[in-house]
Image: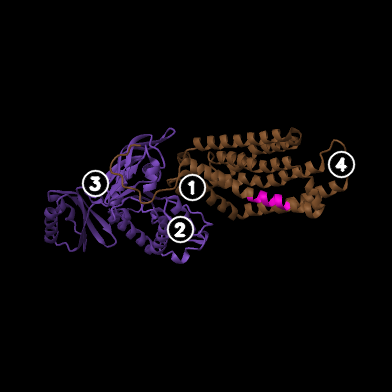
Amino acid sequence: MSRQGRVRALRYAPPGDLEMTWLIARRAAIDALHDRLSLLMGVAFAVVVPIVLVLVILRPLVASPSADGEPSLGDMLAFNLLVVGLLPTSAAIGIASGQFAGEKERGILTPLLASPASNMAIFGGKVLGAIIPPLVYAVVADCVYALGVAVVLGPAELRLLPVWLSLTLIALIPAVAWFAASVSSLISSRVRTFNAAQQIGGLVLMPVWGVVFGVAAKLANWGPLGMVSTLAGLLVLDVVLTTLAATTWRREEVLAHR
Amino acid sequence: MIEARSLRREFGSVVAVDDVSPSVPDGTILALLGPNGAGKTTTVRLLAGLLAPTAGEATVAGCNVRIDPAAVRSRVGLVTDTPGLHDQMTPWGYLNFFGRVYGLDDDARGRRIDELLRLFDLQEFGTTRIAGFSRGMQQKVALARALLHEPEVVFLDEPTAGLDPLAARTVRELIVGLKHASRSIVLCTHDLDEAERLADRVAILAHGRIVAFDSAAALRANASQETLVQILLAAPCAAAVSIAERVSGVSDPVVAHTPQGPLLVYRTAQTQRTNPHVISGLVAAGAGIVSVMCTTATLEDVYATAVGSPPTDVVGAGA
């Protein structure tokens, strides 16, 4: 590092990348949790959807015995863990869209861009900040779902949940939320408006959710190794995508659009 | 301290800033003037380490903006033309967040936030959501954010825009205080009076280039060596123009008919020599003299000339 002229010692030393990332993520997550529309949608996904699912779909299903070739009740219960957990993660698109394109539109991104935070810390923090609120909603959703099953169908039904499948499906939720937040942040950081970011993000991620549900439906047949491999594959994809997006993002791209 | 050499920034085919070389020693204020789109904001962003220059070099607080922009950003404070605040946060929460980002420990953060909230008369509103704040209050929070980490160089883009006169005065006093604390300050403003009052140097930008750079007084002096003399007469004097024409060193004498009365107007570079001759000639011709006013070029005239718009005719419609 070469510097010209006299350089005074810094009175305050900015934190390292990890701490900076966490600071930005926490700030972004708190902002998202304070947003009334996101909060309303989150509560609807986290509370209403699981209850409706248990009452409207699962209760009649338990009452009538499954025919040959249909998935077992245990697999069905496990699959719905993914369904109720994954629905709130769609909020990651809106949050990530708001964090780059939305903040740019409102003129509130510049102070952070003018700070000593690195590109990686800003991008990583924004991605993490877009994951945390949906995951909070997802945890609540799965708890409400499990409680609903226990109350409406009886606690014994919970014992039907296949352990490996259930764990894999639950672990898929943050992995998919991470993927959604990375893709949405990637788009949001490169378009000019919040609406454009949200629309493009939705269009790109809709097929991804289809693929995830398709894969999840087949997971029970793949055994523990197949489940772990699928999960590991998605996590590797998340790491690669986030790293690629963060390293190719330049703060000046945000300011360069005139 | 800011030292820049031939900064240039292109956005695609558009050259936003070209061959800009401002220098701002410690303890001085540089005012950047220019019409919208002249390159002021881009210049500030280049110097604040937000944008990399396409060409040229700049050293800000001892750090090279091209080689170490992060070090530059940790040593400068920036207030943009919009406050850029998270309106769901409180001033305290907002400043606390940026205090952490700039690395202030808990004690320093608490102390600085309290100091700045007190300085800007915001201590009562420290825990009130920013959403309900007036533009002026928001601007104060933005200023507090820029000063939180005690930066060596401060960039202020329209810092008094939207502030009431007393708040604007507080900000101006603060800017002068920063100058006395040996900070280098770059002030982007459309308020020429503010620039003249505060700045040690003025740079006028047009089409991305600095077209004038000096102290306000020197710019005014260089803009016109001549003084505009306006003599208000009590009654019409037919010989007024010919009397002025006879005095060497007087140019373009005319009589304008104003509501106050006939106004003899001329230009001269030697007021001390020419004015007594003209006035004694007028008196000898029986003209009553109501007032004499001498005007040199204003910063507004300099600005208008520099950005390519002719100065307003001071004589008025009656000339």
x and y, in percent, of residue B278 in the image: 14, 56
Nearest to viewer (mark 3 / mark 2): 2
Nearer to me, A206 or B219? A206
Give yes or no for contact between labels 1 and 2 (Cβ–Cβ under 8 Å): no
Amino acid under label 4?
Ser
Q: Is residue B162 magenta?
A: no
Looking at the image, residue A238 lies above or below residue A33: above
- The residue labelled by disc 2 is B138
Q: Write down the quadrant of residue B17 in the picture.
A: top left
The amino acid pointed to by label 2 is: Gln
Residue type marked 1: Glu
Residue B184 screen position, x and y as percent: 31, 50
Which is nearer the eye, B218 or B316?
A: B218
Q: CA distance from mark 3 to mark 2?
A: 38 Å
Mark 2 lies on a secondary structure that is helix
Discs 3 and 2 carry the same chain letter: yes
Report the Cα–Cα distance between label 3 and label 1.
Answer: 54 Å
> What amino acid is found at the position of numbered circle 3 in the picture?
Ala
Q: Which mark is residue A200?
A: none
Looking at marks 1 and 4 on the same chain, the residue that comes earlier in the sequence is marked by 1
The residue singled out by tag 1 in the image is A19
